């Protein structure tokens, strides 16, 4: 697996501890955090980001996701909030984690 860093193509996981980039989608009910466990651990703690996909059945108008357990080499826990109150909604949260290249 190669990535473009600093003007050159490089191996993204030079430590050999697993793929340097992982991503996915997890269904999360607002206020009920979901845990993501990586199939293969990262060789170092990754940098992660998430985004709420508001096209789901939850009918959220806006929302932000956040990590309730910080990312580690083996996974993380994520939740989301629509800031509108009312009944909890279920939406998909897209996530991506990487430990490759310069942050």
Image: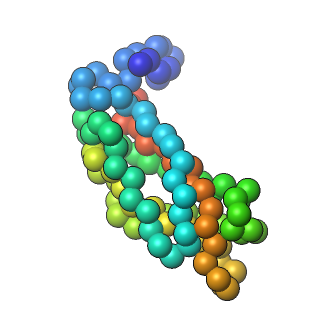
Left or right: where 22 falls relative to 51: left
x and y percent of residue 57 in the render?
71, 63
Residue 50 in view here: no
Q: Residue sitting at 28 percent across and 47 percent down?
A: 74
Residue closer to the observer: 102 or 3:
3
User: Is 86 rendered above or below residue 30?
Assistant: below
User: Is 48 rendered above or below residue 55?
Assistant: above
Left or right: where 101 falls relative to 41: right
Q: Residue sitting at 39 percent across and 53 percent down?
A: 36
Residue closer to the observer: 91 or 22:
91
Q: Picture quarter containing residue 53? A: bottom right
- Residue found at the far front of this picture: 57
x and y percent of residue 59 in the render?
74, 68
Locate the N terminus and report the quarter of the image it occupies: top left
- Residue found at the far bottom of this picture: 86
- Residue found at the far top of this picture: 9
Q: Residue sitting at 23 percent across and 25 percent down?
A: 15
Q: Picture quarter containing residue 80? A: bottom right
Residue 72 in view here: yes
Q: Picture quarter containing residue 89? A: bottom right
x and y percent of residue 25 in the render?
54, 48
Left or right: where 56 falls relative to 73: right
Q: Residue sitting at 51 percent across and 43 percent down?
A: 24
């Amino acid at each position: 697996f190669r990535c473009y860093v600093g003007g050159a193509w490089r191996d993204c996981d030079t430590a050999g501890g697993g793929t340097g980039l992982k991503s996915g989608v997890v269904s999360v009910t607002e206020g009920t955090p979901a845990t993501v466990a990586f199939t293969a651990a990262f060789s170092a703690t990754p940098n992660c980001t998430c985004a709420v996909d508001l096209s789901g059945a939850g009918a959220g108008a806006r929302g932000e996701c956040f990590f309730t357990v910080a990312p580690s080499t083996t996974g993380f826990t994520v939740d989301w909030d629509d800031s509108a109150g009312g009944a909890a909604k279920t939406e998909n949260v897209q996530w991506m984690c990487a430990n490759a290249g310069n942050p």
